[in-house]
C-alpha cells in the first residue's frame, strides 16, 4: 500500500499545477478549480492502482473525470437562480486578473463541453484524438464542439449571440 500511495503522490506532485490550470479554465476561477481538482483526486486516489492498470493514460483519465465532474456540477446548479444583495459603497476589484478580459469572460460563459474541448485543445495543446479519448466522445463531436465554441467566442466577443 505504501508503494501505491507513493505512486499517487508522485503523480499529484508532477501534474498538480497543470490540473489546477485546467480546472481554472474549466470553472472560471481558482477557488472552484482547486475544489474540482481536490474532489477528483480524492475519488481517484482511493483506487489509484486500478486507474493505473485499467487506463492507458492516468492523466487523461483525471482530465476526463474533471470535465465530467464540472459538467455534472454545472447541470445541478444551472437551474438555481441566485440573487445577491447589492453591496453598499465601493466594490473592490476582483483578484482574478483574467476577469475583465473579453476572451476569458467569453470562455467562462461557454457551455461546459465546449469549454472543455477548447481548453484541452488550445490551453493544454491536445490533439483531436487525445481530446476525444480524454472526454470519452467521438472525434467528430470534438470537431463540432470546437467549431461551435469558436463561433460562440467570436459572437460573444463581438456582442453577438450564442451557438448551441
Image (tube, rainbow, N blue to C red):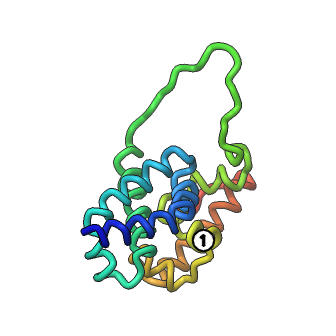
Q: Residue at x 44, y 56 (%)?
A: 37
- Direction from residue 29 to residue 46 in the image, left or right: left
Q: How many marks are shown on the rendered structure?
A: 1
- Direction from residue 65 to residue 103 in the image, left or right: right
Residue linked to disc 1: 124
Q: Residues within 10 Å of mark 1 (few under 14, many from 20)?
A: some
User: Where is residue 161 shown, x and y percent of the image?
Assistant: 63, 55
Between 154 and 136, which is closer to the camera in this rendering?
136
Q: In this view, does 54 lie above or below 117?
A: below
User: Where is residue 114 shown, x and y percent of the image?
Assistant: 53, 65
- Direction from residue 16 to residue 101 in the image, left or right: right
**SS label for mark 1:** loop
Q: Is residue 59 above or below residue 100?
A: below
User: Where is residue 116 shown, x and y percent of the image?
Assistant: 52, 65
Residue at the far front: name it: 2
- Which quarter shows the N terminus? bottom left
Q: Residue at x 39, y 73 (%)?
A: 61
Residue at the far top: name it: 88
Q: In this view, does 147 lie above or below 105?
A: below
Q: Which residue is drawn at 45% across and 73% down?
A: 59
Q: In this view, does 110 lie above or below 64?
A: above
Between 35 and 135, which is closer to the camera in this rendering?
35
User: Where is residue 20 shown, x and y percent of the image?
Assistant: 53, 57
Q: Residue at x 66, y 38 (%)?
A: 95
Amino acid at each position: 500500500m505504501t508503494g501505491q500511495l507513493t505512486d499517487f503522490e508522485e503523480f499529484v506532485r508532477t501534474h498538480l499545477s497543470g490540473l489546477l490550470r485546467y480546472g481554472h479554465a474549466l470553472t472560471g476561477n481558482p477557488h472552484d478549480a482547486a475544489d474540482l481538482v481536490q474532489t477528483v483526486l480524492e475519488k481517484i486516489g482511493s483506487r489509484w492502482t486500478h486507474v493505473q492498470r485499467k487506463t492507458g493514460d492516468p492523466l487523461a483519465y483525471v482530465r476526463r473525470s474533471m470535465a465530467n465532474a464540472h459538467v455534472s456540477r454545472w447541470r445541478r446548479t444551472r437551474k438555481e437562480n441566485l440573487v445577491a444583495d447589492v453591496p453598499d459603497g465601493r466594490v473592490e476589484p476582483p483578484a482574478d486578473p483574467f476577469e475583465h478580459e473579453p476572451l476569458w469572460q467569453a470562455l467562462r460563459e461557454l457551455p461546459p463541453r465546449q469549454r472543455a474541448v477548447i481548453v484541452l485543445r488550445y490551453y493544454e495543446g491536445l490533439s483531436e484524438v487525445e481530446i476525444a479519448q480524454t472526454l470519452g466522445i467521438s472525434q467528430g463531436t470534438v470537431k463540432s464542439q470546437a467549431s461551435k465554441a469558436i463561433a460562440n467566442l467570436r459572437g460573444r466577443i463581438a456582442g453577438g449571440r450564442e451557438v448551441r
